[in-house]
Amino acid sequence: MTTVLQDTANAAAEFSSDELLAECKARANIYRLLAGTFLEEPTADYLNAIRSPEVTASLREMGVAFGEDFTGEPLEKLQDTLACEYAVLFVVAGGCPAVESIRLTGRYQQQPYFEVREFYQRAGFQVSDSRFAVFDDQLGVELTFLAEMLDRAADALALGDQDGYERVTKEIKRFWVLHPGKWVRGYASLLVRASEHSFYREMAKLLANFADWEIDLLGLKVDDVDGGKLKVPKAEIEYEFDPDEPVCNACEKGDDDQEEGFQKIDISLIQSRLKES
């Protein structure tokens, strides 16, 4: 974790390989910190790391200001509280899942899901099982992928492979334009409004600011399609299943009679919070 990054986004000077390597590692650390927020409910180890003096100081310099509900709570109680908040925001019916397909199409496992999975496979990655099953286009997975790609870029620099570094950087830019650049900024703004606990509110602010910073650093132009909308209109179905998966007429998946119930996204809990704010 470092705040030196904030001073280099618009710097005109050329950087040495050592400076670029340090920058890659610092950015990867921030990606992983954010990924840990959204992949699953926070573990005790994760919370202890966040509340350590070093990380707290770095986050403070990046504008993160946790409230007493985070800094003053005993660990066990905090973990229980955040597990409940995580469920309300991201898991149970009534929340706003951190999934690209949902945010852009109003449906699970649509075109973004298959596109990111293909992107990962081309880069030699595959989403592995963890404590909880996650979609390939879930926010934490996309952030983790970018962290891994930055590790590759750093490794290339360490070996003096400038061409390799530039190839990986090109893929990072492409992924940002095709995927997170389209939705994470708007989605983060929704989380800021919907979160009741300062931990998720402040981490959502960090996500939005870091996304802006990365897009500027990489020299990208990508529209925020998400826009922080609470209700996302359901798009015409592009994929409801893996197009490579054999299909038979014996199953009900995709049946028009089942479609409405299968596709419904309940946002009632988040909606009620926003009305109260």
Image: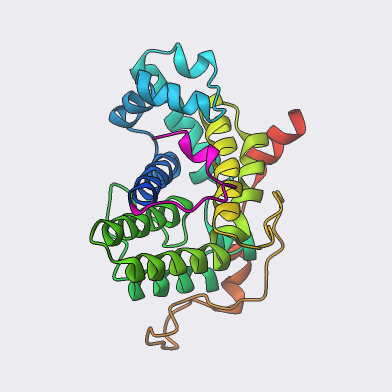
Q: Is residue 125 above or below residue 25?
A: below
Residue at image coords 67%, 56%? 226
Judged from this view, the residue extending furthest toward the left is 159
Q: Is residue 148 magenta?
A: no
Q: Which residue is more in the foreground, 65 or 217?
A: 217
Residue 41 x/y as whole percent: 40, 37
Q: Residue at x 52, y 43 (%)?
A: 8
Q: Is 26 situated left or right of 205 in this image?
A: left
- Is 105 drawn above or below residue 271 in the view shown? below
| Front in this rendered view, residue 197 or 242 | 197
Q: Quadrant of the N terminus?
A: top left
Identify the image quadrant of the C terminus.
top right
Quarter of the figure with residue 264? bottom right
Magenta: main secondary structure: loop
Q: Which residues are magenta?
A: 1-17
Q: Which percent across, then down, holds residue 184?
A: 58, 52
Q: Is residue 8 magenta?
A: yes
* Residue 219 rendering spot, x and y as whole percentages: 59, 60
In the image, 106: left or right of 38? right
Residue 110 seen: no
Q: Residue at x 39, y 71 (%)?
A: 167
Residue 162 appearing in the image: yes
Query: Considering depth in this image, is 40 or 149 the residue closer to the camera?
Result: 149
> Which of the pair 134/207 is nearer the observer?
207
> Image height check: is 69 above or below 235?
above
